[in-house]
Amino acid sequence: MKRFAVLLERLAFTPARNAKLRLLTHYLEATPDPDRGWALAAMTGDLDLRRVTPGLLRTLAGERVDEQLFALSYDFVGDLAETIALIWPGQGGLPNAEPSLSQAVALLQGTGKAQLPAAIAAMLDRLHPSERLAFLKLATGNLRVGLSARMARMALAQMGVPTVPEIEEIWHGLTPPYQPLFDWIGGGARPESAALAPFRPVMLSTPTDIEELRALDPARYLAEWKWDGIRVQAVSDRGQRRLYSRTGEDISGAFPDVIAAMEFDGAVDGELVVRREGGVAPFGDLQKRLNRKTVGRALLSSHPAGLRLYDVLIWQGEDLRDRPLTARRQVLEAAEFPGGRIDLSPLLPFDDWDALAALRADPPEAVIEGVMIKLRDAPYVSGRPRGPWFKWKRDPMVVDAVLMYAQRGHGKRSGFHSDFTFGLWDGEALVPVGKAYFGFTDAELRELDRFVRANTVERFGPVRSLAPKLVVEVAFEGLNRSTRHRSGVAMRFPRISRIRWDKPAAEADRLAALEALL
Amino acid sequence: MRAETILFPTEAGLYCPSGGFHIDPVRPVARALITHAHSDHARAGHQAVLATRETLDIMAIRMGEDFAAETQEATGPLTIGDVTVEFFPAGHILGSAQIRVTPKAGPRIVVSGDYSRAPNPTCTPFQPVDCEVFVTEATFGLPVFHFPDPMEEMQRLLASMAEFPERPHLVSAYSLGKAQHLIALLRAAGHDAPIAIHGAMQRICDYYAARGIALGTLIPATADEVPAQLVLAPPGAVDTPWAQRFRDPVQAYASGWMAVRARARQRATELPLVISDHVDWGQLTGTLTELAPSEVWITHGAEDGVMRWCELQGMPARPLRLVGYEDEAE
């Protein structure tokens, strides 16, 4: 339990992805089975445990600690589980006899409701203070360490022979604590997973521009619209249906409407979109359907999801990945997808790059964010090879905004203010409309940092409030209505495209100009 | 005499009319008795200052030799006016003292200043002193504060340095007391490599070394390339351009406040280290139990928590509500 507690603590305070990865890899290497498997499952959210309610924890604390002292402490600490972890009397059981993570998991899996309070109190008594928080976070299902399943698999791949794609292929057939997986990593046999409908690593594109394209023969390429949805892989395998994000996260639970429409046997590649009136709804509509475990009836009918396919990996038991794109496309075109939720992304007719440029400049739907250009002869290969697939995005939208707040960055930008909040004028006031972390060069970062230090008006912890002086041109890929942002709009992929040292702040854009882009 | 007439709070700080002195006054006074050299307790501009040798020396280093018109080193009992005062070690930082005020007739009052009961290789341990009134701080006066063994915290820091050998570890620590405490702990934990220190710590570290406290090899963190993986700096320095010379540092912060996550987050630290020079809840309440004074006065910090504890114990207590002392700098 101790090692798990130390890891959680480090992960909670470590912002950088690579550092997180290293901490995780070291933990997995140093921790025996089955603890490491349970830890992995707990951190990626794949562990179903009995959920301990805040009410139960409060009652337990009330039996041990004066109510008034507890209230003062909770008020100071601000987090119930942490307050209890810190305030729980005693220094744990005997050293070297502390409970393991497996024992904690067993308690939370196997204890009946009536016995649970006493079991939790007994566990807290046995745990060292530093481990109580980890246990309580586990018990309340609230680890929040920012660890995706993808990162977990990257850490596993660093430990042994199997690569990330190899691990991804079998991942969904495994259950915690993943003993066969660790055996494989340790040099044993590959687990012959009984899991149907596995995820296959996807093929990704690289950005391009007209200069690069001019050197290529247009006759060798196909082109399609680039849809502003999310990339998915839909797999239907002898009755088992799954919908995966492009990183292999299983998102089936949030899309029962799509799952129901997957009347085929195979693995297809396409864009997940919300369909409306025959067209594709803006990304904001799709966002309402994302990051859910389940979805209600109202949302299913107001935001119906569907697939727009552009490739196929497996069809009726046959692996097509080695075949050229044109052959795979023929398979897709011959298939039938009844019900209207699934269709094909149409091919764009073009004779030369200028013709394609003209199409790209004037797409028929607002949710198209550019064109995809794919080599006709290319097989389907995982990863991001340069050459077979290009994305040629529409030019971004831009606004001139005023820098409002700055925060110190991390990693190689540590010591520099690199996280910026910017705003637009609404009447006489600036309204924050977004945050940007990149888009500037290292030299510009140094200049921005100097500006921040010289123009700080107020500080709130690590955040500096700035005098409204500096205008930056912010480029972004799209705009959605948002109730979470004070301005009522949220930008996609905002970045600072130019620093307008020359432009007076009063001449920055108004909020109305941004709203007009919606 | 009643305790409240021997010593009571004024705008300038705790005042003893029978002796004509203030203890740790926050504005210039005629005669000041100073418990320790932290800047919220030890200020410049008093006429006369009575303090331990170390406190006087450190005040001179930080504020200049002329920080007071007249200074006197506290050694043994000393009669001032109608009271006797005596200094005893407080275990907080080098030179830190509790001050006992004994009237000709009436209760003896111990003003403990800031104090700690945890072993600290850089200063003399806290000495329990008989008294009727004990004046305590309450910086960490809530039962959530239980400080771990500092050596465990050092092991976490050293483990991080081993885990990220290519990254400098930039530890924020208060320049006086905490920094030297941390260095001594690191040496005790077996870290023998040179430790780089921010310029603001140099003279205090030199003074500690001159007083016989072994800090090992310290190098200035002033060049563009600092040849040490471990760098100590005062808390504000990580937010200045000075910190830009370190590439991708692990930012650590050594303070008792790091025991609470929300406080650690406010500091944007990556490695919170719970190292304190104050008493935690167990040590504070343990000290009150041990001394068993007839009355407890609480100077600054989380008075409500300590008040409630005293109430539960049936120990008379009252808050002094002194202003001007920072508990943030810990």
Image (cartoon, coloured by chain):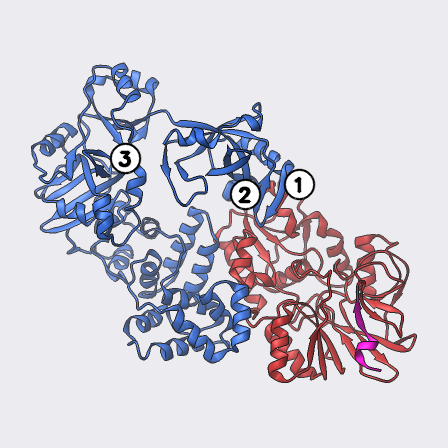
Label drawn at residue A510? none
- Residue A219 spot, x, y in % from top left: 19, 17
Residue B7 covered by magenta stretch: yes
- Residue B206 spot, x, y in % from top left: 75, 55
- Residue B15 spot, x, y in % from top left: 83, 69
Say left or right for B198 vs A209: right
Where, quadrant-wise, is the C terminus of chain A in this rendering?
top left
Disc 3: which residue:
A204
Examine the rendering and report whether any part of residue B226 can be seen.
Answer: no
What hue represents chain B? red
What hue represents chain A? blue
The amino acid beneath tag 3 is Leu
Are the residues flagged by discs 2 and 3 from a single subunit?
yes
Query: Which of the two marks, 1 or 3, is nearer to us in this view?
Result: 3
- Residue A489 spot, x, y in % from top left: 40, 38
Q: CA distance from mark 1 to mark 2?
A: 26 Å
Q: Chain of mark 2?
A: A
Q: Is label 1 in contact with label 3 (beta carbons under 8 Å)?
A: no
Disc 1: which residue:
B223
For the record, the magenta segment spans B1-10
Say left or right for B8 vs A11: right
Dividing the picture into quadrants, the one containing residue A215 is top left
Q: Is residue B64 above or below residue A356?
A: below
Q: Chain of mark 3?
A: A
Residue A437 covered by magenta stretch: no
Q: Is residue A414 above or below residue B263?
A: above
Disc 2: which residue:
A407
Task: Give the secondary structure at mark 3.
Answer: loop
Say left or right for A305 vs A482: left
Task: Give the secondary structure at mark 1.
Answer: loop
